[in-house]
Amino acid sequence: MIRVLLTVFMLLALSIPAQAQVTPFPASFRTQDIPVEGVTLHVRVGGKGPAVVLLHGFGDTGDMWAPLAADLARDHTVVVPDLRGMGLSSIPDSGYDKKTQAGDIRGVLEALGIEHSVVIGHDIGTMVAYAYAARYPQRTDRLVVMDAPVPGIPPWNEIVRSPMLWHFDFGGPDAERLVAGRERIYLDRFWNEFAGNPAKVDEATRQHYATLYARHGAMHAAFAQFRSIRQDETDNKASMATRLTMPVLAIGGEKSFGSNEAIVMRNAADKVTEVVVPGAGHWLMEEAPTQTIRAVRDFIAQ
C-alpha cells in the first residue's frame, strides 16, 4: 500500500511542472529593468544579430513571445519588454497613450545601444508598434502588426462599433472595484470570446497571466491602456498624413480580424503583405504558434 501511495505521489509531482507555467524563454536570455522617462520597463534580451522588438497586448505580457523569441534569437537580437503598467514593469499614473509608449520603447532600445530594428506587435502592442513606426520611421526596418485595429485608421469608425469591443471604454474606480479579486473572471471573457478555440489558451496560461494582472495597480493600468484609445485616435489621424514606407506584415486570425488587419494597414502604409492564419482567433501565439512564427520568419527574411 505504501509503495502504491509513493508511486501516486511521484506521478503527481512529475505532472505539476507541465501545468504550472507558460513556455519559458531560453536560458540564454537575460532580464533587466530599464528606466526610461516616467517608467521602468522589465525587458528580456537574447540572441545576436539584427534587432527585433516584440510588443505584447492585453491579457498577456512579454511572456507570450517565448516561442517566437527562441526561434528569432538564432540569428537576431531579440528585445521583449513588458509595456508600461503591465507584467513586471512599473505602474505609473499616466502615459498610456501609444505615442508615449512608443517613446518608452525607443528609450529601451537606446539604453541597449540599438539604432534600428524590426518592430512586431500584437493587440495593444500592435497599436504601440504602429505609433513607434510612425514616430521613428528611420529607426524601423520592418513592421509586423497582429490581429488588432489601429485607432483612427480606417475603417476604424466601423470596427469600433462592434459590440465585442465594449471594453475600450470600460474603466474607472467602480470598474476597478468590480474586477478586484475577480481578475481571472474578467480575463476569461477575452480568452473565451476572442479565441477561435478557447481550449488553446490552456489553464497554465490563464493562471499565469491572472496572477500578474492581480498585482496592485495592474488592472488600473490595463484599463488605462484602453481608455487612452481616444487620444490614440487623434494622434494616429495626424500620423496618417505621412504614410509608412517600410515593409509591413499584417497578420489576422481567420476567426478574428482576418483580412481586416491588412485593410487597415493599407490605409496607412505603402507596402503591406497580408497573412490570415486559418482556424485561429485573436490569440495567435497561443492558438497557432507554428504558423505565426513561420509567417514572421518568412517576412523578416525577405
Image: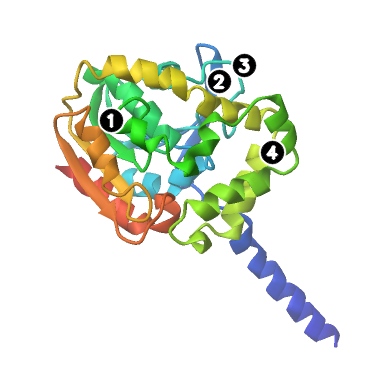
Who comes first in sequence, dot 1 or dot 4?
1
Residue for point 55% across, 17% down: 39
Residue for badge 2: 40
Residue for point 51% across, 53% down: 193
Q: Is residue 262 visible?
A: yes
Circle 4: residue type: Ala
Secondary structure found at label 2: strand
**Closer to the camera: disc 2 or disc 3?**
3
Residue for point 48% across, 42% down: 163
Residue lying at the far top of the rendered structure: 37
Give the distance between the C-alpha atoms of the residues marked 4 and 2, in whole angstroms: 19 Å
Secondary structure found at label 1: loop
Residue for badge 1: 154
Res 175 → quadrant: top right
Residue for badge 4: 214
Q: Quadrant of the C terminus?
A: top left
Q: Name the disc covering residue 99, or none.
A: none
